[in-house]
C-alpha cells in the first residue's frame, strides 16, 4: 500500500489546492484531516472550498464527501455541530477509505489537524475513553502537584514515561487520570489505527514566511467578515448549535458575540485574526516534530515543480 501522500502545513498555505492539482494529474482522491471541516452547515468559517469560485467548474456536496471538479474530497460534512466527532471517529472513517481505495487510486491526506493525521497513519496512539466531566470538575481547582500525585498513585509507571511537557500540563494529567481509572493504566488505554505499520507514505510540508501568512490571514478574515461568516453564524444559531464545540471555538466564537451585539465587528475581526495566528504557531510546533517531512516554501517561484520532482522520484518511478 504505497499510494498515500500526506500534505501538511499551517492554515493558508494552499494544501488542498495543491492536492487537487496533483489528484487531477493521476486520478487521485483527497481525505481532509481537519477537525472542523467534518461539520455540516459550516463551510465559510472552516474554509472548505479549496479553490477560488472562478476555478470551480463543478461542485457536488454529499454527506462525508464533496466532489470538486470531479475530484472526491472525503471528510467534509460528516456530522452536525450538535454531534461529537473524535479522533477515533476520524481514524475509523479515514482508514476505511484508504483500505478500500489505495490499491487503485493515489490518496492525498490533506489538513492542518496534526493529531488526526498522525493517529490515522498509526504514528500516534489514541483512546476512545470519554471525558469524565465529574472528575474534571473535581480536579480543576486542585494544584498541579496534587494532580501529579494522584496519577503517580494510579499509574506510577505511566507517569514515569511522560515527558516534562505532559507532566506539567494539568489538563493532560487529568486526561491521563481518566484513562488510568477506566483501563488500569495509560498504556492499556492506547489504541492504534489499523493502518499502523501497513501503509507507506510520503509527507510534504508547505510553508511560507510569517509576513505572507499574516497578510493572507488578514485578507481572508476581512473577506469572510463582509457578510458570509455572520450569515453562517446566524444560521447555525437558528439551528440550535450555540453550545456546540464549533461555535465556542476559533473563528466562530467572536462572530457569535458580534451577532449577539456584545462585540463590534472590527473587534471580532481582530480577535479572529489573532486566533488564527496563534493556531498557525501551534500547527508549526506539531508538524515540525516529524523530521521526515520534506518542507517546501510555496512562496518560491514554480514551487510546484519541486513537488512534482519529489513525488515522481519517491512515489511513482518505483
Image (cartoon, helix red, strand yellow):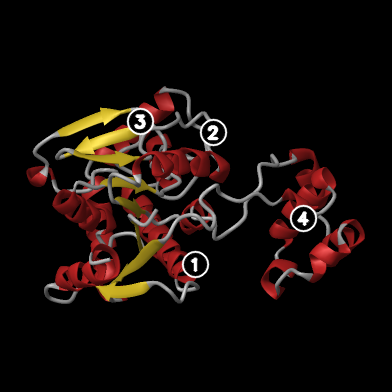
Callout 1 touching callout 2 (CB < 8 Å): no
Query: Dividing the image into 4 quarters, which one contains the C terminus?
Result: bottom left
Q: Residue 286 carries which label?
A: 1
Q: Residue 78, position in %: x, y?
A: 42, 32
Which mark is nearer the camera, 1 or 4? 4
Verify CB contact (< 8 Å) between mark 3 and mark 4. Answer: no
Q: Which of marks 3 and 4 is in front?
A: 4
Position of 301 with respect to 266 (left or right) is left
Question: Which residue carries the number 3 mark?
Answer: 41
Residue at figure coordinates x 28%, y 76% from the top left: 209
* Element on which disc 4 rests: helix
Q: Is residue 83 above or below residue 93?
A: above
User: Which of disc 4 and disc 1 is earlier in sequence?
Assistant: 4
At x 15%, y 71%, the residue is: 305
Q: Do the residues labelled 3 and 2 touch (CB within 8 Å)?
A: no
Across and down, in percent, residue 95 comes to 46, 43
Amino acid at each position: 500500500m504505497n499510494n498515500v501522500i500526506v500534505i501538511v502545513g499551517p492554515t493558508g498555505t494552499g494544501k488542498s489546492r495543491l492536492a487537487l492539482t496533483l489528484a487531477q494529474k493521476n486520478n487521485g482522491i483527497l481525505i481532509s484531516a481537519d477537525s472542523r471541516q467534518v461539520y455540516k452547515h459550516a463551510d465559510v468559517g472552516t474554509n472548505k472550498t479549496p479553490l477560488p469560485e472562478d476555478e470551480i467548474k463543478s461542485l457536488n456536496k454529499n454527506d462525508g464527501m464533496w466532489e470538486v471538479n470531479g475530484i472526491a474530497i472525503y471528510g467534509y460534512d460528516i456530522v452536525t455541530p450538535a454531534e461529537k466527532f473524535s479522533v477515533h471517529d476520524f481514524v475509523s472513517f479515514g482508514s476505511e477509505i484508504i483500505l478500500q481505495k489505495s490499491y487503485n487510486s493515489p490518496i492525498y491526506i490533506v489538513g492542518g489537524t496534526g493529531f488526526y493525521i498522525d493517529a490515522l497513519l498509526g504514528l500516534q496512539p489514541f483512546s476512545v475513553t470519554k471525558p469524565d466531566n465529574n472528575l474534571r470538575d473535581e480536579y480543576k481547582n486542585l494544584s498541579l502537584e496534587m494532580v501529579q500525585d494522584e496519577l503517580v498513585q494510579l499509574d506510577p509507571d505511566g507517569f514515569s514515561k511522560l515527558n516534562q511537557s505532559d507532566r506539567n500540563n494539568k489538563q493532560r494529567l487529568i486526561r491521563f487520570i481518566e484513562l488510568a481509572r477506566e483501563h488500569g493504566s495509560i498504556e492499556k488505554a492506547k489504541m492504534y489505527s489499523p493502518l499502523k505499520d501497513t501503509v507507506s507514505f510520503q509527507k510534504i510540508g508547505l510553508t511560507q514566511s510569517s509576513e505572507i501568512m499574516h497578510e493572507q490571514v488578514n485578507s481572508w478574515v476581512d473577506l469572510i467578515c463582509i457578510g458570509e461568516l455572520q450569515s453562517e453564524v446566524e444560521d447555525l444559531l437558528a439551528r440550535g448549535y450555540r453550545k456546540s464545540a464549533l461555535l465556542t471555538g476559533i473563528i466562530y466564537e467572536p462572530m457569535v458575540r458580534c451577532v449577539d451585539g456584545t462585540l463590534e465587528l472590527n473587534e471580532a475581526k481582530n480577535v479572529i485574526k489573532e486566533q488564527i495566528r496563534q493556531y498557525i504557531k501551534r500547527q508549526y510546533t506539531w508538524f515540525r516534530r516529524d523530521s521526515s517531512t520534506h518542507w517546501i516554501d510555496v512562496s518560491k517561484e514554480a514551487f510546484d515543480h519541486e513537488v512534482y520532482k519529489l513525488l515522481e522520484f519517491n512515489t511513482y518511478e518505483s
